[in-house]
Image (cartoon, coloured by chain):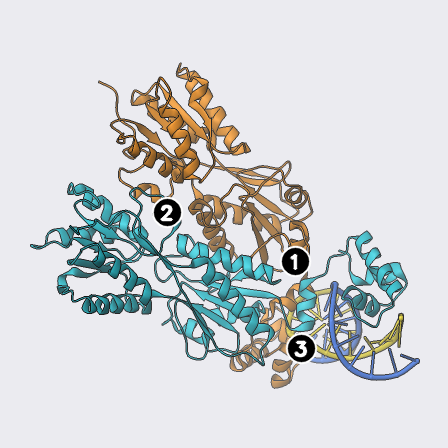
Chain colours: A orange, B cyan, C blue, D yellow
Amino acid sequence: MVTITDISKACGVSRATVSKALNGAADISQETAERVRETARRLGYLPNATARTLKMGRSYNIGVLFSDATGGGISHEYFSMILESVKAEAERLGYDITFISRDLGKRPMDYYEHAKYRSCDGVVIASADFQDPAIVRLAHSEIPTVTLDYSFDSRSSILSDNVRGMEALVRYVHSRGHRKIAFLHGEMTSVTQKRLASFKKTCAQLGLEIPPEFIRPAVYHDPRSSGLQTRALLELPERPSCIFYPDDLSFLGGMSELERHGLSIPQDMSVVGYDGIPLSQVLRPRLTTYRQGAESMGREAARLLVEQIEQPDTWLPQTITVAGELLPGDTVADLNG
Amino acid sequence: MVTITDISKACGVSRATVSKALNGAADISQETAERVRETARRLGYLPNATARTLKMGRSYNIGVLFSDATGGGISHEYFSMILESVKAEAERLGYDITFISRDLGKRPMDYYEHAKYRSCDGVVIASADFQDPAIVRLAHSEIPTVTLDYSFDSRSSILSDNVRGMEALVRYVHSRGHRKIAFLHGEMTSVTQKRLASFKKTCAQLGLEIPPEFIRPAVYHDPRSSGLQTRALLELPERPSCIFYPDDLSFLGGMSELERHGLSIPQDMSVVGYDGIPLSQVLRPRLTTYRQGAESMGREAARLLVEQIEQPDTWLPQTITVAGELLPGDTVADLNG
DNA sequence: TTGTATGCGTTATCAT
DNA sequence: ATGATAACGCATACAA
């Protein structure tokens, strides 16, 4: 390994001079700086982030926390899109990312300890169970954090606009003439609560009466669960004309159940999803859904975190709500006229 | 931050003793060791991986390289499943993972430099353009590496069994009475070459004549491209009875094109995919495809890499071929009798 | 403009 | 059984 000591010997200057020259300090002569840099290049010098971290107390490394409490880890398209955009933005800003997990080998650790162990400058928390005491500890620690889809007091967060998203879907479906709308929701997280509340509120505003049996619990990202609930809906004496699924993937479970009953979409039953993952627009018919701005969310999360890391004095906790977009698709029949 | 120095003061012993006690060295009295550990717990001591890395020359950190040359980055289910299993196994073995990329902030870097910069003990290379000189440099460097789906000379690798996978699919389709089989293939990587060669060889063994216009180039993970090629196939004077798609996702493009022509699957046209991602078995009809053992591949990659890192002397390059599994699904019609 | 000295937190060697 | 010391590679305050 080539170190600044090697360069200093090769150049006949001190290590301090080499360090300064390499970092473009002002108090080094043009000539020396050039000679040092040239030698560094010639010897194939690579800075050592570890040493720099130890010395400076800054790792330029941010942790990413993806516990998969909501049943969906990295491998769900929504979260992998977020991960990808966090990664891209972090790298653009000069930060590497490391996954933060519970336990490492034999060593029992919670998230906070793991982040400290790796000297992370900050952590992006996504897809986690925000009730988990280990998550709470991290979010309340001195480590800068940004959470996605949940907001802790006095901490920064990025929220998908679940309220407006659900409202947009309900209004769209209503505008197509639907009055009997069923809603399958995921596990009771704060996101679910927002969507459910927005669903009910918007229905009320539109004067829609939603019978309680039209609102049923399912499980996010689990087609089977949504399939079962779809069947239950179909067995009701009075069927809905449109079913809201917890997410795009869950819709697939409903899709097969509908087919099994010989119902076609949207002629016999209308459906909408949520998330707007690429898959939803590749299906035929294209799914009517609400696209969450996953890329923006990841990008903003990284940006906000780095801002907090680099300007700790002027920093204030901030919540950014990322707007999404209604994707009309072709799965909601027009019942008008 | 609590350091061993703090503990040493609190305990009235030297830092060396603390370090030894904490690491369970044999030459520390039972009593002292216990007192030190208790104090460490009381003070909330956390070891500092950075300092340890600097001192020991081992980071317990492995790099993961996911350039998305094949058009599919982390967000494709096959790769995210691999990533997830690499992560899980690495963590089980006591290693963290860090993404390796080109360039970090302003700092221009290639993959090798990035890995050195972060003192990675080794790198798992996946989803990359293995012709890329930067990838080649890394794979030929002194850094331990394991590649997925490609094999460099004298380096360890994990290969999905593309030859047997394709053979299984062809034989299955043939056994269902199909004789006119079309093959849409992805970009010409070594994986594609293996699948294509296995396709042709198996067809030859079965006495099938495949006209050249039945073999067409498409793009991995790109439904649009496969949709276009599907259309081209349908315009031929003599249509195939079954279409092989480059992968499960690409099939979706074909699916909509088939529907557009009023053809239903598998009554009017049979199809098979490749990958066997969860999505394929959630679709209706379930896609006939070949499931690659993504979880095993990731797990084995991590295992092989750590083995190489921890037993450098007894290590020999090794290639593990991970078998997959035919998923019969319901998209291949039985033309027999 | 350059160099000296010091320390970041840890582990390892070698005395004691 | 314990401790003093050095070293890993780097950056910086301060001296020259």
Q: Chain of mark 1?
A: A
> Observer-nearest residue: A307 or A330?
A330
Q: Which mark is residue B279?
A: 2
Q: Which residue is mark 1?
A: A119
- Which residue is pictured at 53% across the width and 69% down the height? B305
Rendering coords of residue A50 (x, y %): 63, 67
> Observer-nearest residue: A138 or B300?
B300
Q: Are marks 3 and 1 in contact (CB under 8 Å)?
A: no
Task: Choose mark 3 or mark 1, whichever is in front.
Answer: 1
Rendering coords of residue B108 (x, y %): 48, 67
Question: Which element type, helix, strand or loop, lies under badge 1?
Answer: loop
Q: Amino acid at mark 1?
A: Ser
Question: Which element type, helix, strand or loop, lies under badge 3?
Answer: helix
Q: Chain of mark 2?
A: B
> Observer-nearest residue: D8 or A227?
A227
Question: Which element type, helix, strand or loop, lies under badge 2?
Answer: helix
Q: Earlier in the sequence, mark 3 or mark 1?
A: 3
Is A180 left or right of A301, judged from the image as shown? left
Residue A16 image-quadrant placement: bottom right
> Observer-nearest residue: A22 or B201?
B201
Quarter holding the C terminus of chain A is top left
Q: Chain of mark 3?
A: A
Q: Do the residues indicated by labels 3 and 1 lie within the same chain of the protein?
A: yes
Tell me, yes or no, if residue B192 can be seen here.
Answer: yes
- Which residue is pictured at 88% across the width and 58% down the height? B10
Q: Between marks 3 and 1, how big is the CA–CA gap?
A: 26 Å
Q: Between marks 3 and 2, how big is the CA–CA gap?
A: 57 Å
Q: Which residue is mark 3?
A: A15
Compared to residue A321, the image places residue B26 above or below, namely below
Quarter holding the N terminus of chain A is bottom right
Tell me, yes or no, if residue A95 can be seen here.
Answer: no
Classed neighbour count for the residue bearing mark 3: other residues with Cα under 10 Å, few (<14), some (14–19), many (≥20): some
